[in-house]
Image (tube, grey):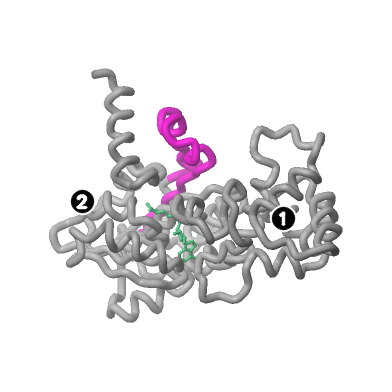
Amino acid sequence: MSRIRKISKRWQKISLTNKGHIPVMCKEIVEYLKPSERKCIVDCTLGLGAHAQELLKHISPQGRLIGIDKDEESLTLARERLKEFEDKTHFFHSDFRNVDKVLDSLGLESVDAALFDLGSSFYQLSAFGRGFSFLREGPLDMRMDRSIFISAYDLINNLSEKELDYIFKRYGQERWHRKIAHCIVEERKHYPIATTLKLAEIVAKALEGRSESRIHPATRIFQALRIVVNQEFESLGIGLEKIAKFLSPGGRICVISFHSLEDKIVKEAFKRLKANGRFKVLTSKPVRPSSWEIKLNSKARSSRLRVAEKI
Ligand SMILES: C[S@@+](CC[C@H](N)C(=O)[O-])C[C@H]1O[C@@H](n2cnc3c(N)ncnc32)[C@H](O)[C@@H]1O
């Protein structure tokens, strides 16, 4: 069987066993994190547990994995998937910015490897009622942690035009940020904008005849709102700083990001760790998924992996 056919078969199998969710750069993560040599791995973004499952399959006999996610529903699904590794896994409903508290609660002073696979999960994008996707009708929510108070609805209906404009420009990197913010504010004078499809329709209308991009006109607007609702960039900076302190010598951090600003935060955090003489960076340039992975999983297209190792 040719190499590409073998790989396709393996990916089809992975995709089926993960009920549609394909973990990004899974092979690279196992290669860099070397689970067979580790006693303790932290998956800071457990999601549906697909990366964790691969790591647990290879983890050393005494090894254990700590899985953190701020989305309680994802944790429930991951728990189900990882049932066979029950005695090796600890689950925590928390923001990874609190990783120090999670590890303290287990009495751990160090860990050997950490993974961050940023952004939203396949489950969040496809679940009715979560409001992450502009392709499915649902309330404008987008909270990963449903115990927080501010949702995308609150931002869209309460922020000023100037504030919306700023968010769309900075976090969405949307060329037509001003026009879209203006159209939203005009529209909400008549009624609150409450659903995903309504917002997507307003954005598409605002960009009529303007956007030449191949992506859906609402992609960047939804991305910007999700980042702000979940304070994703703030958590990332804090989480990386904290996990660096807990890593044992030879321990590695892998970060997969999907947004150029996210990647910049990772790059700068690694640069600071290197400058302090505490880490070496193993990826001078971010690792990109192979062309066959992109063919099989178009969501991998924008992913970038950076890896650092504690000295
Ligand atoms: C791309 S998914 C991870 C998928 C996972 N690697 C897998 O294989 O199933 C990202 C996950 O990280 C979670 N997440 C994002 N930011 C987080 C944060 N600051 N703290 C904890 N979990 C976070 C999301 O709720 C989501 O479930």
The segment highlighted magenta reads 283-311
Q: Position of residue 105 (x, y in %)?
A: 32, 81
Viewer-proximal residue, 187 or 158? 187
Classify mark 2: helix, strand or loop.
helix
Which is more toward the observer, 115 or 139? 139
Identify which residue is drawn at 76% across, 50% down. 202
Mark 2 in CB contact with mark 1 (< 8 angstroms): no
Image coordinates for residue 249, horizontal then vertical, percent: 31, 62
The residue lying at 68 percent from left, 47 percent from top is 218
Q: Quadrant of residue 302?
A: top right
For the residues labelled 2 and 1, the Cα–Cα distance comes to 40 Å
Position of 233 compared to 73: left or right? Answer: right
Q: Which residue is mark 2?
A: 57
Which quadrant of the view contains residue 109?
bottom left
- Amino acid type of disc 1? Arg
The percent position of residue 273, horizontal first and vertical second, equals 48, 61
Which of disc 1 and disc 2 is earlier in sequence? 2
In the rendered view, tell whether residue 8 sits above or below residue 88.
above
- The circle on residue 170 is 1
Determine if the C-beta at disc 2 is less than 8 A from ligand 1. no
Where residue 276 appears, as percent x and y from the top left, is: 49, 63
| Image point (55%, 51%), residue name | 263
Secondary element under disc 1, as helix, strand or loop, is helix
What is the number of the mark on residue 309?
A: none
Residue placed most toward the observer, 285 or 65 = 65
Q: Residue at position x 64%, y 55% from top?
A: 196
Quadrant of the frame with the N terminus: top left
